[in-house]
Amino acid sequence: MRAIWKGAVSFGLVSVPVKVYAATENHDISFRQVHAKDGGRIKYKRVCSIDGEEVEYADIAKGYETDDGQMVVLDDDDLAELPSSSSREISVEKFVPSDQIDPILLEKSYYLEPDKSAAKPYALLREAIREADRMAVVTVSLRSRMTTAVLRVRDDVIVMQTMMWPDEIRKPDFANLGATEDAAKPQELKMARMLVDTLAGDYDPEEYEDDYASAVEALVQAKLEGGEVTHAVEEEPKAGEVVDLLAALQRSVESARSSRGETSAEPDGEAADEGADEGADEAASNTAKKPAAKKKSAAKKAPAKKAPAKKSPTKKAAAKKAS
């Protein structure tokens, strides 16, 4: 496993350097959307819902939609003013009884590994939590946002589980829930308890299997062995796409300059290439469109290799979006 975060657990005057690892992984079956006729992957374009035109990545901003349907556009300066945190500390606020933490509040789980020099304080914290039968409520900054979490012990590892905020838990406001209060008769309740006792037992995760995933894998394997495989022909990039890329970069340059109140004449000939290079760098720094700038440079230095170089990223992007 690879650590996704490094920091320290602090409680009182004790600090425990740790590495954080994702404790779970999703094994859900993922299908691609393809053309039933030839197996070609379905591609999507970023299109504006108002004018119907395809939108360049550099022109996409973040928008917040209000409850009444109004859209507020936020730029990079607005987002920079939002509160963020880059603290590398998992701060223990208090130790609470385990039964006070409703499981519905728990979100994603992480393993905490002690640093080489932190074996003793790590063991001290682990055993204190285990013997007290409590969970440590902590605050931690993940992905620049402060959140709450709990620390508990699983086997010999301290597990951190992030928590939902209280206002993220929906209330079960059901009209028919009240009718269930006195619905069960004493004799029926007695029989229900007998059924519970009959089915009582210990939980063993090995008794359960994802039969859907197993069935899908068996089905796919059977089709592979039977030769039922479609090899989709990838469309070769056309030479005109290089020109389109240059034009898109030029438009991004002009847009970036226009937003700063600058004006520039349309370059031509060799100057156009130089202007596109310089403008692409400016646009990259202001709009975070670094991939486009790199593609432009590659197209200028080695135009003969442009088509195959662009093919792989296109496939990866399409696969990711389709999933």
Image (tube, grey):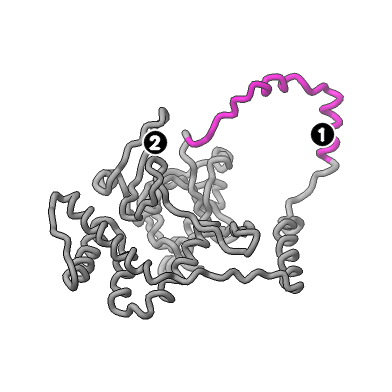
Q: Which residues are magenta?
A: 168-197
User: Which quadrant of the structure image shows residue 51?
Assistant: top left
User: Which quadrant of the structure image shows residue 296?
Assistant: bottom left
Which tag is nearer the camera, tag 1 or tag 2? 2
Residue at horizontal 56%, vertical 62%?
41
**Residue 65 numbered tag:** 2
Is residue 310 visible from the viewing direction of this image?
Answer: yes
Q: Residue 48 placed where, x, y %?
A: 39, 45
Who is closer to the viewer here, 118 or 51?
Answer: 51
Who is closer to the viewer here, 139 or 5?
Answer: 5
Q: Residue 108 placed where, x, y %?
A: 52, 51
Q: Is residue 10 magenta?
A: no
Residue at horizontal 41%, vertical 74%?
307
Mark 1–mark 2 distance (CA, rounded to whole Å): 50 Å
Q: Residue 28 placed where, x, y %?
A: 63, 57
Identity, as a three-letter code, of the amino acid under mark 1: Arg
Q: Earlier in the sequence, mark 1 or mark 2?
A: 2
Q: Quadrant of the C terminus?
A: bottom right
- Please rate how many residues cluster around mark 2, counting C-alpha atoms within 10 Å: few if below 14, some from 14 to 19, many from 20: few
Q: Residue 322 placed where, x, y %?
A: 54, 57
Residue at horizontal 28%, vertical 78%?
301
For residue 201, above or below residue 173:
below
**Residue 211 numbered tag:** none
Residue on which the image places disc 1: 193
Q: Is residue 187 left or right of residue 121?
A: right
Q: Is residue 196 magenta?
A: yes
Q: Is residue 7 left or right of residue 252?
A: right
Q: Is residue 298 left or right of residue 315?
A: left
Is residue 91 visible from the viewing direction of this image?
Answer: no
For residue 186, above or below residue 147:
above
